[in-house]
Image (spheres, grey):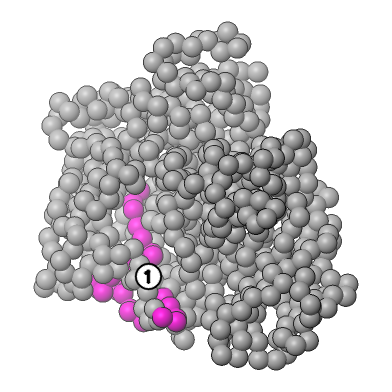
Amino acid sequence: MDLQWEISYFDANGNALFSNTRESGWLRTDNRYFHPELGLEFQAEFSTGFSGSELLTVRANSICESLSNRFRTLTPLGETIRGYEGETGTLLLPYGSGLLCHTKEKEPAEYLLSLFSERKWQATWGNMALWGYFSGERASLAIIEGGKFETDLRLRTNWGENHEYRLDPVISLREIPDETILNEDITICFATIPGDWKAIARFYRSYNLTVRKLPRLADKMENNHAMAYSIGALTVRCRMCVKPLPPKIYEQRPENEPTPRIFMKFNDVMTIAREFRRQNVGPVEFNLVGWNHGGHDGAFPQLFPAAEVCGGNSALNQVIKDVSNLGYAVSLHDNYNDGYTLANNFNFDDVCHSTGEYGGPVVGGGRLGGGQGYRICAEKAIGYAERNFAEIKQRLPKISGAYYVDVLSIIPMKKCYHPGHPLDRRGNADAYKKIIGMQHHEFGVAMSEGARDWAFPELDRAYMVYNNFDTGYPFVDQHVPLFQMVYHGFFLYNNSRSGVNAWPGSTDYIFNYAWGGVPIVYFHHLFNPAWSSAGGWSRDLTFETPEKLTRDTTVIRKMSDDVVRFAPLQTEFLDDVVHHSTTLIESQFSSGKRLWTNLSNTEVITPYGQKVAPFDFEIQNE
């Protein structure tokens, strides 16, 4: 492979400057790049990788700085993942479920899109370290492993005099001049294969099975009753209590801590469970949100005593036992990203530190129930999780099902510059993977908010794969189920926030199944007035009168029945998704079974003669 490189670096005064190996001054011998005047040097190695792909490696010990200049970023300029204005090509981006950018009619523009880092938070986040381009019957792709937590993707549309479209990885070696350089080999797999984005999805799925050796759901089910139950279970989240929002007291103390607003008491969960059992709803995994001291986001990492306004420790313990005796699983909502100074077990010295202009302790999820949240250094978060999980197991032995730790699998990875516990982004990911792995080990099923693929294989279930279907980005022509075609059969998921409380008979409800997802029921989903319908916070399910619960449960019974119908497809791979029309979608699975989803209010007949009721699905065997 003949590569050129763009380099940015810091000079002796800390100024960020740029260079390119095409420029004079750069010497190249056997893919060793050296600039004597700048004192910058690195070596590119090429070998045969997975399935005949070409593997690029830049070893950390080959990156040398002999003078006063310091590397900042490296950008390999590949020649295969690019096209030109007016061609019939398409760029594939790993954001949302997968985004397509056709090489035509775009404004000249450049975008820097983060994969897993926090340099730019966006509503559509990077889920995979994979990108590509396809045109005609050929597709090219790249997969970055070493260096992926320091990588942004630079997208250029209709760029320059050649009107070029391209995707290139910008790999950060350091962010400030006096920072230690990245101590990690950079590895990128490049491949060219027959097909389009679907072929790229299948290639990456094979890569995950062969190279990353990810276990399938079928493997995770073995000797794991909780996992086997979860595959056919409807997730039902119940928000118990939350302090008034927005908070007026940012640094709370026991004497000035606001009283949480009650949405549901612990006994109310039992009332729901009894009605569920009366109407034969199930299997169900109840997840209690805001059960802990201070309510939802009220005093993490402190958990006990359980929220007194909802009934306290004894009522919580009793309802878990009683709901379990009805045959349902009960688990908890937890958090190891945010820490609040109110917590009696929180050491402020464990907070992640930033550097540069915004140096000092890092705020976490913002200002929520517990006041000002601070981001706990991921390495320190492990200890809090270990201690809390042990206490939960001791106090609440009947806890089972998908234990939920908030945001770990969705938030960007962050460096910690605290002198006592510095951590790079890969270390951040490794620490979170350890916590997610502990969830699986202690409770059987590990669930978190997102589905970024660095969290596999530890992650078992995701609250959502992407946030909103429409990204708002001007370069997006189509949103496709790339992620689902790669990872269905590896974990359980709801596709997007619009799938939360989407009722049968709606487009969002049935579309979720078309892309391999299952719905989520959430009592009192809406709790923060700052979050709007534009962000997906539009549907609520409230716990009120017995009559309303009876009516709601009748609908929820239909939802749980659908989850059970779909369950046999959860352990299979999703091989293809074909949109026959705006209303009829065919999802093909690895066993040869087909899922037909009807997004219209009239009955449709598939090309095989099978009838599909309005806003419903049917499974066709081979």
Tell me: residue 486, above or below residue 190.
above
At label 1, the amino acid type is Arg
Q: Residue at x 42, y 52 (%)?
A: 123
Q: Any magenta on residue 100? A: no
Q: Residues within 10 Å of mark 1 (few under 14, many from 20)?
A: many
Residue 309 locus on image (x, y percent) = 13, 54
Q: Which one is in front, 107 or 8? A: 107
Question: Circle 1 sits on which residue?
Answer: 375
Q: Any magenta on residue 332? A: yes
Quadrant into which the N terminus falls: bottom right
Residue 221 locus on image (x, y percent) = 55, 41
Q: Residue at x 79, y 81 (%)?
A: 25
Quadrant into which the C terminus falls: top right
Residue extending furthest top? 609
Can residue 217 be seen? no
Can residue 521 be seen? yes
Q: Residue at x 70, y 47 (%)?
A: 83
Instruction: Provide the residue span drawn in magenta.
Output: 331-357
Q: Residue at x 15, y 50 (%)?
A: 262
Residue 287 locus on image (x, y percent) = 33, 46
The reply, left or right, for residue 618 in relation to residue 334 is: right
Residue 164 locus on image (x, y percent) = 67, 52
